[in-house]
Image: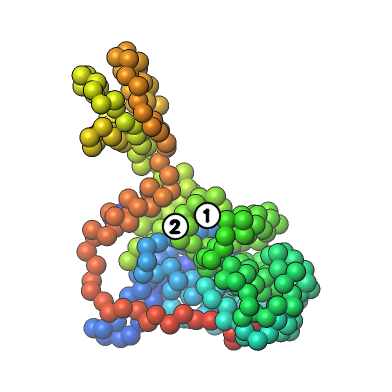
Amino acid sequence: METSRPTRPSDSVIEVTDLHRHYGAGATAYHAVRGVDLTVGRGELFALLGTNGAGKTSTMELIEGLATPTGGSVRVFGRDPYRERAAVRPRIGIMLQEGGFPGELTVAETGRSWAGMTSGARPVEEALELVGLGHRRDVRVKQLSGGERRRLDLAMALLGRPEVLFLDEPSTGLDPEARAAVWRLVRELRAQGTTVLLTTHYLEEAEELADRLAIMHGGQVVVAGTVAEVIAGRPSRIGFELPEFTGTALPVLAGAEVTVDGRKVTVHTTGLQDTLTDLLGWARHHGIALGALDARSASLEEAFLAIASEASHQPEPEAPARPTARRRLIGSAR
């Protein structure tokens, strides 16, 4: 599959060039990241998507400055986030997949502890209110639900009023109402000028929030751009059911691919309006009612699944599984 290189924003705050990360050495080395190029502009929300094991987390760790690349370079605000950590860390916020906060502390105690290690921290109560946890301030962390713990993770990432915010699977464990609240907050932060780099398995989340995105597979970026650019060229879909007895053959739909499964018909087309017009004209002419008629443009989910399927057929060198230990937030404060 041809790799797509993302367009470079005119005012980049994150620049990733030919990034590599290997685990192990020699013949047993696992190449988790293989030549990734990314740029994220100031005030932009960039989503990093990918199949399991695609290299998203490894890439994020390198950009966050939690590890050093095997090859290539990362710059955040023009600086190396690993070697110049003291200059970069006060300006960023990191929400990891798991915060790892002590369970015996209350929510407020956790906030005060974290604020004491954070430069220019906003008031703890303000951070808790931002994520809807103000009313849970006196509850021990171990008594929080999974969704509440994710919101606590986000609150701690926001304590330092970050210029760049890293969100690693922020909606995991959230119910629909809480997820919508997090989306509103992220939109508000972006509107205030915060740059956001997001990883997510919820494609709807990326479609709703991202200015641009990249899809990774096998440690590489296989496509990047706006949602519209990524979807462009992917076929739209029309689905319907025929009556039991029509006595009439389906029409020839130029440029469309038609699949028939009993009475169910699925049409894939790059010209949705023309194909649908031809289909409805045929149905009206013959007096045929199309049951369960559904027509929709290509979605990010369909594009993602197609890209993942195409990429999975590309040969990859065999490699041992990467280490599964997930880093925790404790110890990474500034």
Amino acid at dot 1? Glu
Of the two numbered discs 2 and 1 on the same chain, state the one appearing first in sequence. 1
Give the image location of residue 80, x and y in percent: 54, 76
Q: Which residue is mark 2?
A: 214
Residue 237 sits in which quadrant?
Answer: top left
What distance separates the C-alpha of mark 2 from that of mark 1? 14 Å
Please indicate whether residue 330 sits to the left or right of residue 231 in the image: right
Residue occupying the point 26% across, 83% down: 28
Q: Secondary structure at mark 1?
A: helix
178 vs 210, nearest the viewer: 178
Q: Secondary structure at mark 2?
A: strand
Give the image location of residue 313, x and y in percent: 23, 58
Residue occupying the point 78% across, 72% down: 125
Hey, which residue is sitting farthest front in the picture? 244
Residue occupying the point 49% across, 62% down: 200
Residue occupying the point 30% across, 86% down: 25
Where is the N terminus found, in terms of image quarters? Answer: bottom left
Amino acid at dot 2? Ala
Q: Nearer the viewer, mark 2 or mark 1?
A: 1
Q: Is residue 80 visible?
A: no
Please indicate whether residue 169 sits to the left or right of residue 258 in the image: right
Classify mark 2: residues with Cα within 10 Å, few (<14), some (14-19) or many (20+).
many
Classify mark 1: residues with Cα within 10 Å, few (<14), some (14-19) or many (20+).
some
Q: Is residue 21 visible?
A: yes
52 vs 73, nearest the viewer: 52
Q: In the rendered image of this protein, does residue 24 appear above or below residue 280?
A: below
Hey, which residue is sitting farthest top in the picture? 285
Please indicate whether residue 186 sits to the left or right of residue 220 in the image: right
Give the image's coloring scheme. Answer: rainbow
Residue 94 sits in which quadrant?
Answer: bottom right
Please indicate whether residue 148 sits to the left or right of residue 215 in the image: right
Q: Which residue is mark 1?
A: 205
